[in-house]
Image (tube, rainbow, N blue to C red):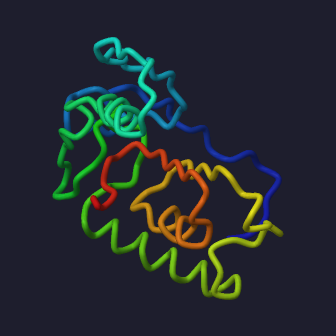
Amino acid sequence: MGITNEPPPARKQASAADLPTSEIGTAPVLNEISTIEPAPLEVDDAVDDDGSSIDEQITTYTKSLSSSIVDYPVDYGRRYHAFRRGVYVLPNDDLEMERLEVTHAMAVKAIGNRPYLAPLEKDKVQRILDIGTGIGIWAIEMADVFPNAEIIGNDLSAIQPGW
């Protein structure tokens, strides 16, 4: 095959019939970014937030977990989160939790067997926010290092261990 000055042969314009279809329906799979309408949020019953004890606050926090959030769909033998189904590509099953544990262990080892690199003063840390907490192992380790801090973990899936 040599180099020529001739233009490449014209390509046939693809039609919807030429495109692959999804497993679920007959809609063509396009290689374009499409706009996904957000799913409507389920509103929980109003919670009176005038409680002063920590027990009342914990009850308030746990009440916000809707049962539909933990009704996990299973696709191709893997379990996924239920919030905006299909938007987040990684599963939340036991195999994924094992992968997250290994990834966490590797990251901690890579940064010197510590859960963080920031120059934090233990007596000054009051709150720690873990967005995408996954299995919660980092938040748990940070709670061990900073026992007086409030640790908040937030994730699409409620797969963290109970205690």
State which quadrant residue 9 falls in: top right
Residue 10 to residue 103: above or below: above
Quadrant of the snapshot with the N terminus:
bottom right
Count of labels in the image:
0
What residue is shown at x 54% (from left), y 53% (from top)?
A: 151
| Image position of 87 (left or right of 108) | left
Give 148 or 72, whichever is nearer the viewer: 148
Residue 87 in view here: yes
| Residue 133 x, y percent position in the rendering | 48, 55
| Image position, residue 44 (x, y; %) | 30, 17
- Which residue is located at x 29 percent, y 30 percent? 63
In-image side of 142 versus 76 (left or right): right
**Which is more toward the observer, 115 or 151?**
151
The residue drawn where x is 22% and y is 40% is 70
Q: Is residue 124 left or right of residue 18?
A: right
Q: Position of residue 108 (x, y in %)?
A: 60, 80
* Above/below status of 29 relative to 161: above
- Observer-nearest of 66 and 140: 140
